[in-house]
Image (cartoon, helix red, strand yellow):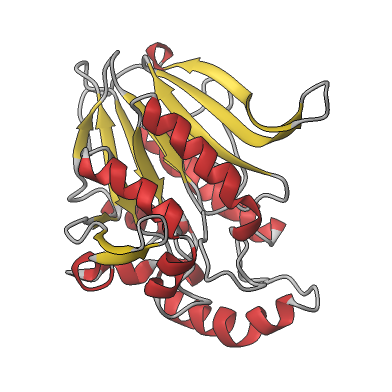
Amino acid sequence: MSFHSRISHSFDSAPVLPLNQNSRYVLFSDCHRGCGNTNDNFLKNQHLYYSALQHYYQQGFTYIELGDGDELWENRKIEQIIEVHNTVFALMTKFAERNRMYLIYGNHDMEKKKLYYSRRHCSSYFCTDTQQVQSLYPEMPFYSGIILEDISGLRLYLTHGHQADLLNSVFWRLSRFLVRYVWKPLEHTGVLDPTSAAKNNRRKNKTEKRLSAWAESQHEILITGHTHRPRLETSHSYYFNTGSCVHPSCITCIEIQNRILTLCKWTVSTYPNHTLYVAREVLAGPLPLSQYSVRASHP
């Protein structure tokens, strides 16, 4: 199966969510939530992420995670991840309880595609705030792709993006083995994983070219993560990327509001009196969806 077919296949049974002037969606990807050890790349940005999610929850946004939310290649059990980052999961539960959360699986959390995964592993957790066992999201499905569609028929295709990378899609079990037993120990010595599209520029460029080629050939807007490189070109492009939550000093995401796309960064900034605060900055946009035409038919 070609990368083009793999990407298209991700949307075969994808749910279609409404997109209109009142819609508010925020797209995050590649959180790579870990178990709190030195390999937990999410740990340094967890406060930025939590602050951003609080903002989007209070502003009525629907949270969509485009895969690799949890690091299940380096860690075997999501229960340990939930225990360490239980305040984050408590906030995610609030989104879920109000039907304002949708989750896509990526290559690093491919295990979530299994039937009943959330029921078996995400049913409950011990909340440190309440000191009680509380319900998480036991009935939450994990999708390979999601489609946003407005009344005119314009569609936004959301998926993780690993489908463009043979090693991280078809041979993902081999990649997981290498990450878990080879590259994870070497990471402590400064060796970067050469199989990762996020850490290897050659693989990153190749993956993004393929994702962009699919979007251009289909004449459809495609939004992914996977490469960790945020992208929102204001020119007439069809491929965009949310970036990740494991950048050295920030997290990035794409907001969709009033049928307008905005690429945002959340980082620590300083007031004139030297007080620190979490700041939202616009990296690119706004990009009105009104500049895109609607295809006569959908694949």
- Residue 171 visible here: no
Quadrant of the image occupied by residue 156: top left
> Where is the C terminus found, in terms of image quarters?
top left
Which residue corresponds to the image point at 68% horizontal and 61% vertical from the top-left?
A: 199
Quadrant of the image occupied by residue 281: top right
Which residue corresponds to the image point at 20% horizontal and 28% vertical from the top-left?
A: 297
* Observer-nearest of 183 and 298: 183
Q: Is residue 206 above or below residue 195?
A: above
Counting labels gives: 0
> Where is the N terminus found, in terms of image quarters?
bottom left
Report x, y in % for residue 249: 72, 46
Which residue corresponds to the image point at 64% horizontal and 79% vertical from the top-left?
A: 184
The answer to whether 267 appears left or right of 160 in the picture is: right
* Observer-nearest of 112 and 120: 120
The answer to whether 187 appears left or right of 181 in the picture is: right
Which residue corresponds to the image point at 28% horizontal and 15% vertical from the top-left?
A: 22
Report x, y in % for residue 73: 49, 75
Report x, y in % for residue 144: 30, 55
Seen as rendered, the residue at the extreme front is 131
Report x, y in % for residue 42: 58, 58
Q: Is residue 262 above or below residue 254?
A: above
- Residue 176 visible here: yes
Quadrant of the image occupied by residue 26: top left
